[in-house]
Image (tube, rainbow, N blue to C red):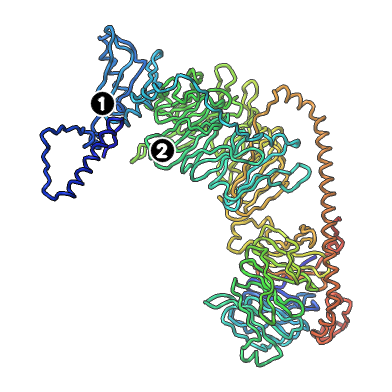
Amino acid sequence: MAADKGDQGSRKSKRSESSVENHIIGSDEEEEEPDFSDPEDFVDDIKEEELLGDLLKQRPKETDGIDNVVVVDNVPVVGPDRVPKLQNVIKKIFEKFGKIVTEHYPMEDGKTKGYIFLEYTSPIHAQEAVLNTNGYKLDKTHTFAVNLLSDFDKYENVPDEWEPPAPKPYHDVGNLRYWLLDPDCIDQYSVIYESGEKTAIMQNCIYLNSVREPVVIEERPRWTETYVRWSPRGNYLATFHQKGIALWGGERFDQIMRYSHPGVQLIDFSPCERYLVTFSPLPEKSEEPQAIIIWDLRTGHKKRGFHCETTTQATWPIFKWSQDGEFFARHTTDTLSVYETSTFRLLENKSLRISAIKDFSWCPSDNIIAYWVPEQENVPARVTLIQIPSRKEICVRNLFNVADCRMHWQKNGDYLCVKVDRYSKAKKMEDKDALKYSGIYYNFELFRIREKQIPVDKVECKENVLAFAWEPNGHKFAYIHGESPRISVSFYNIRPGGKVEQMKVLERRSANHLFWSPMGQFVVLAGLRNMNGVLEFVDSADMTVMAQTEHFMATDVEWDPTGRYVATGVSWWGHKVDNAYWIWSFQGRLLSKQPMERFCQLLWRPRPPSVLTPDEIKEIKKNLKKYSQRFEAQDRLRQSTVSTELIQKRRQLIEEYEKFKSEREEEFHLFKPRRLALRNGIDTDDLGNRADEEYEEEIVEFLLKVEETLIDDE
Amino acid sequence: MKPIMLHGHERSITQIKYNLEGDLIFTCAKDSQPNVWYSINGERLGSYRGHNGAVWCIDVNWDTTQVLSGSADNTCRLWDCETGKELANLETRTAVRSCGFSYSGRTLMYTTDKTMGQPCEIHIYDVRDSTQVSNLSPAMVIPSESSKITAAIWGPYEEYIITGHENGEICQFDAKTGEKLITVKEHNKPINDIQASKNMSMVISASKDFSAKLFDTATLRHMKTYKTDRPVNSAAISPVMDHVVLGGGQEAMDVTTTSTRIGKFDAKFFHLVFEEEFGRVKGHFGPINSVAFHPDGKSYSSGGEDGYVRVHTFDPEYFDFRFEY
């Protein structure tokens, strides 16, 4: 029976119950056939709701269609003559989300009222329209405010009195940068070993002049399921899990935040450490895009999800960040989409149309994007630099016969090098559209960003280029070129005037990677993997080779963020035996070998940029002698404490051992009779020791051969 | 010190042992002929012919009258040391992995592999009782249920046998009752070798887990650990110095993937107490399978996968070297 509301309903139901009772009693008493027809004076006062309440409930209501309706505000106010045009525009925008059943343009004084109603066929379409068009900028003065009609009830019920939201309890995560407070500026690094079972954060206790074992700060089993990553300023450690990403930090490495993203595989931090981008290849279940999610790092809120079109891009990061974290961008086949982090929408609501854009990259110091497009239909390939957000082209460089381009920014954003692979002949492949290039040679186009109108220099290289790298804080670059075994490394310097000069060519090297120290000047040339781990430490100031050495089968080289140490590793991911990491000084002196069972990955904890101004740094450099004296004294002290500690420890060990030894000796003497009994009374205890004293010299003479020689009688 | 090279084996050396006086070296290899050599000049004295398979272990009794060798041909044979005559042929169901004479030489033991559905067992024979040998009825059979025995030696005074197992355990078995007295698990990979110090108060274990460990013989208390970056195949304690020598190297199957230049086949010398490496001896071009100190501590020998036995005599500086403490 339907439950009715209000007094009337309840009364009625009582009555009906009593009538039923009566009926039952009647049936008990008299067994004659019941009369089903109503008495004459019967008034049917049972309402339909009572009988068919449950059915009536399903009757369509006026408000049922409301969920399908959206209200669009801030629509331009136009006269009747332009209404059809407006309708067209509106339809174009809103029909993307589903069929519009009815549209209503309220009119007043012959003009539209500035808001309209649109009805879709299903609430899902309406919701999607709200999600995607709310805040849509039609033009400068009209930004749509789109709501569901049914939401109006919700907003009407908003209390007039504003209640301040209860402040979220402050969660103190401690000093995230505590490790920078270390008086000796000791660096930390993360190590994954036992094939990923264990992850540890270590403190590098190796000083240039005294070596100690690294100290484990934190070690946890199964801390991560794949690998770990430090945030760019070193405040957080990200671990990967099936369900998402976890961030850890602070002195005890407590969990700071979790980001739920099932199947997450790749992540990227914005350089300002405010946003986290995660990528999961799992098929998206809901309508909402969530292949790539951008999170607010500190609050853990999802800022926006994106689809991932795998056809156009395959390289992570798909979204590239500007240095200040204000913008991020991605490119598709014909567009470059720049987003703002203030709204998480497209900058000016439009992507840049750049047909056939191949690649782009942000300048590491300014909001400049460099991109390149290949040759098409007699239009040469070109590299363009544009400013964001103004989108002003500040430099365009046309290039001919381009097979491929690679852009390398110098860390300070002073220079951009575009490595251009050029060809002398191009042949169309028969079956594919792809071109086959032959006679490839290489060009380095060097853009001097800091100078007026951005002059460009060119360096040519006829040989295959294996690696290129800028000196992080300087004007030098180096590249590896040639074919094995004739591989050379060339160093170039850009003079203040802009002259590019070749400094040195190191010939016949086995190297396939080059790593500049983060502080510049020093380079490690490494022949990783198939080159057996040959290492060479070069000082680019005077082009001397400081050390030529080897870490056999090394797979990785990692400079520490201060440029004092280099870690080389043989990762279990690349090579199954001898997994270890070695730590070298920047001059190539081996400081420590750390073999580790199934060692996988070592990552130095990055440091935030220095807070010192360039002048202060200059000042320190000037007075370096003064400081170095102090540090040398510290080093000496440390060394002597190490040796005294060691000697103390040894003394203690030897004492313990001597005690044990004398106990056993005593026992040994006690058991002498037993030994004698076992060996027939012969004392063999000192036999070996006395062996040479007891040698009895015995001379045995025997005939070797008899020879007869005739001697002349002359 | 120019080493003496003993080249008489065609295949990789499996074990080497000195006799009590140290004038003879007994070697066995994966070829079927154990050899005996003069330690002073490396001259071969003779061979023990009869085995039909790789010989895994060899031992000589204290008065150098009998030699015991165990082989993969499922026999453990007793030889007359001087004449090379086979005195007894103890047939087993599986390969013999380790063998040894007791202190008095009156009893002998050997251990068998756990293969072909057969359990791993320690067999103890009394040599004096000829019926035991002829009827193949050992005085004692101790089964090792848990894990295969990969190394075994007699404890002092014939009371118990110390065994090293495939799973890294080291155990004491009572030789009279067969009872397992103590089990310790300090290694997590197979034990390749166990050797005792001169007065048998300590034993050193060599394991595939890249380390060798020192134990108190009586209690199997773990005392020291010597860490390397290679599987350790054999370790020995110097009879005169507080030194141990470790021999090992990457297994033959991994050798091509590692560098020979770094000297991974070196014999490594550690200070017994400080656990610090202080010297290396190179020479082998394959992993070292067995090391042994001369009883006078003035020389040592190593036998390798390359089939050579190298007898090294220490330079005088070796005896002058002192750790600062």
| Label 1: element kind | helix
Question: Between disc 1 and disc 2, whose residue precedes?
Answer: 1
- Pointers 1 and 2 in contact (CB under 8 A)? no
- In the rendered image, which quarter contains the N terminus of chain A? top left
Query: Would you place residue A279 above or below residue A573 in this image?
Result: above
Percent of width and height locating residue A405: 49, 32
3D distance between C-alphas at marks 1 and 2: 45 Å
The image quarter in which residue B269 lies: bottom right
Q: Which residue is mark 2?
A: A310
Q: Amino acid at mark 2?
A: Thr
Q: Position of residue A184 (x, y in %)?
A: 75, 37
Q: Is residue A319 left or right of residue A476?
A: left
Q: Residue at x 77, y 61 (%)?
A: B270
**Type of amino acid under label 1:** Glu
Q: Residue at position x 26%, y 26% from top?
A: A62
Q: How dense is the environment of label 2, judged by Cα within 10 Å: few (below 14), some, or many (20 and up)?
A: few
